[in-house]
Amino acid sequence: MERISHHADLSSASGIRGWLARMVKALRSRNYRLFFLGQIVSLCGTWMTNMATGWLVYRLTGSALMLGIVTCAGQIPMFLLGPFSGVLVNRVNKQRALIVIQALSMLQSFALAAMTLSGHASVTGLIILNLLSGIITAFDIPMRQSFLIEMIEDKSHLGNAIALNSTMFNAARFIGPAIGAIVIAAYGEGWCYFIDGCSFLAVIAAFLAMTISPGGTAPPRRGSALSEVMEGWHTVSRPGPIRRIISLLALTSLMGTPYATLVPLFAGSILKGGPHTLGLLMSSAGAGALLGAAWLAGRRSVLGLGAVIPSAVTVFGVGVIGFSLSRVLWISMLFLFVGGAGLMIQMAASNTILQTIVDNDKRGRVMSFYMMAFMGTAPIGSLMAGWISEHLGAPLTLLMGATACIAGAGFFFLGLEQLREAIRPIYRRIGILPQIESGEEAASQLVFEARD
């Protein structure tokens, strides 16, 4: 019995070590390791700014509608500029462009700090600077998403790198608001903006230190920008897995993610708290998202992610519904934890499948439409949520939006088999799914992989 127990302990330890090794395998690439370390510092600053802006708007106005308008200003450029930013990705040196973009983001954060610390903070100023931030972000995200594959030397680690990106993003989402709550309570919102500006130095240094092989960057495109936009639109709009995945993501963003816009209202008016309450709520969502991203990073393969997507949306919807009904802080934190995990798993799983099945020359444009679906529809949802909240109340607004997300997940489930049939030939062609003569063997492998 002791020998059996000893072997079981060894097997368990080996399993944990194996999972940890799979979770961080993309960090073997030097360039990605530099990016990871620099980006996590910068993202902590970004989440401090997000929290500080939400609290500052609530403190100045107490209005759900104004929260929606300020959030919309920061996100609407992604909807308007997203397709064109995807074209630009294939026309410039991504490494140099990203350095310029991070420098502009740093200046924007310092401008927010100067406005707030000088005592001239206003909603108008926040809208203008958030709009500027949104324009920068519209070019930053597709550029970084497309540059990711050039940072990874072993392309089989791409899926892990995408999941690690989500882990990094949500580690910052957990840490940043916690720090931000302390800074706001002690010194005010302006110092959050200043710290965020300084944090961009880390990611700029990381991009400067990278060594990208000349063959890693695709040659510049010479065709018309409009024709490239239309080619990207044709790729994402024709029937198939890309359209199904992006459509569900757009629905979740439009109807579900506006919960984040209304969290300051819940923290102050419904839960009767202050900056610390807001920090706890935002960090709870970040902790759940971090757990979800870590689970994805530890999976052996991208196989089985098709079924994960609607399941994650359902979990997200349940979390938001619970949050909308709760009037107790720890229960609200628990449901935001659940919702954060579901939303991040949907985002990262969708991202992983799209990056895997899209041709290299179309990746930048498809990822720009991906971000347009997520971040581009969010401002419309934020405005809707702010307006509806003014008339029906924030809890009912979130309840209706989350119910719509769950209904969308149900429709996605109905077409799951067609999605698998469309993706399997692509996975066979690129070597993710081995060429297996027997359909039964292929099906059994898919089931096995889905269990990881």
Image: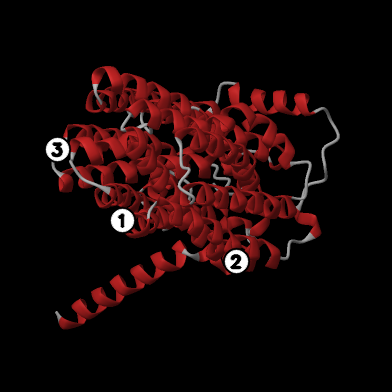
Q: Is residue 237 left or right of residue 67?
A: right
Q: Work out whether residue 378 can be spotted.
A: no
Q: What secondary structure is found at the residue carrying circle 1? A: helix
CA–CA distance in space, label 1 to label 2: 33 Å
CA–CA distance in space, label 1 to label 3: 23 Å
Residue bearing the label numbered 2: 34
Q: In percent of the image, x 63 and y 56: which residue is there?
A: 155
Residue 131 in the image: x percent, y percent?
Answer: 56, 35
Pointer 3 or 2: first along the chain: 2
Q: Residues within 10 Å of mark 2 (few under 14, many from 20)?
A: many
Name the amino acid type tagged 2: Leu
Q: Is residue 20 left or right of residue 407?
A: right
Residue 83 in the image: x percent, y percent?
Answer: 65, 30
The coloring applied to the image is secondary structure
Residue bearing the label numbered 3: 327
Residue 64 in the image: x percent, y percent?
Answer: 33, 28
Q: Residues within 10 Å of mark 1 (few under 14, many from 20)?
A: few
